[in-house]
Image (spheres, helix red, strand yellow):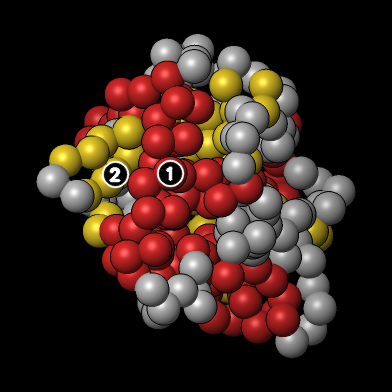
Amino acid sequence: MLIFTLDDETVLLQQSESVIKEAVPDAEVMAFRRSADALEAISGRGLKPDVVFSDIEMPGLNGLAFAVRLKELSPDTEIIFVTAYSQYALEAFKVHARGYVLKPLDADRVREEISALIPDGAGQPRRDPDKLQVRCFGHFEVFWKGEPLIFARRQTKELFAFLIDNDGRTCRAEEIITAIWEDEVDMAAGKTRLRNLVFDLKNTLAAIGMEDALIRRSGLIAIRKEMVDCDYYRMLEGDMEAVNSYRGEYMSQYSWAEVTAGSLYFRR
């Protein structure tokens, strides 16, 4: 096993390296003071760490931006953030405690984290009986009660994906038409086609009792985020399970999603 540890404070970095070696004596441990150096070891030297223990506040890239870049270069690498923040502060940041450990590292905590890297049901959508399960990483998919949600039309599913991508923001008909039908020149015809898709999406959601997940008012349309359990949304909230499920692809079947896919790198 290859483990990276990152901390810009030399003393804490040396302590972390020593603790990890104690906890996982068979592992090779490499220590870095800068996230850029760790990324260079992966991209330039071809190293693929199994696990990275990283301080949240690092020079240059930090936090989510570093995690996203790491997963793009080495998708199978698991990341665990090491922080000086208290558990109460983590809750205030809306992050899930798993995947975050408090400084200073201790051998028992390291062993616990490594043994729990792959959660039960890894790679599967979360099972929340009251929410739609949406997977944005890789191919876009929607699940209800653990089963794929069936859309009558391919572009109805794409409309739903576009609304998810907009993170709860209300969208105008014109921007949806431009995204879904790139070569659409007749806006009036496009609006007619869009109305049909909205009607179809409303019926699809109504059939499972989730019609309220769709917000429509004054020519605007949006998704009610609190009715959706989405890996992308959880990633932005700092959920490390969602971060570690990212493999460098986002809604890969839709060209318009490349904008968000590219922006993930720069998020903090």
Residue closest to the far left: 218
Give the CA separation, mark 1 to mark 2. Answer: 16 Å
Looking at the picture, tell me which residue is in the foreground, 258 or 268: 258
Looking at the picture, how far across and down is residue 230, in whole percent? 48, 38
Q: Residue at x 66, y 60 (%)?
A: 253
The C terminus lies in quadrant: bottom left
Looking at the picture, tell me which residue is in the foreground, 100 or 144: 144
Name the kind of residue labelled 1 in the image.
Asn
Looking at the picture, how far across and down is residue 222, in whole percent? 29, 44
Who comes first in sequence, dot 1 or dot 2? 1
Is residue 109 visible in the rendered structure shown here? no
Looking at the picture, how far across and down is residue 50, in whole percent? 76, 54
Is residue 195 visible in the rendered structure shown here? yes
Tag 2's secondary structure?
A: strand
Q: Residue at x 39, y 63 (%)?
A: 189
Tag 1's secondary structure?
A: helix
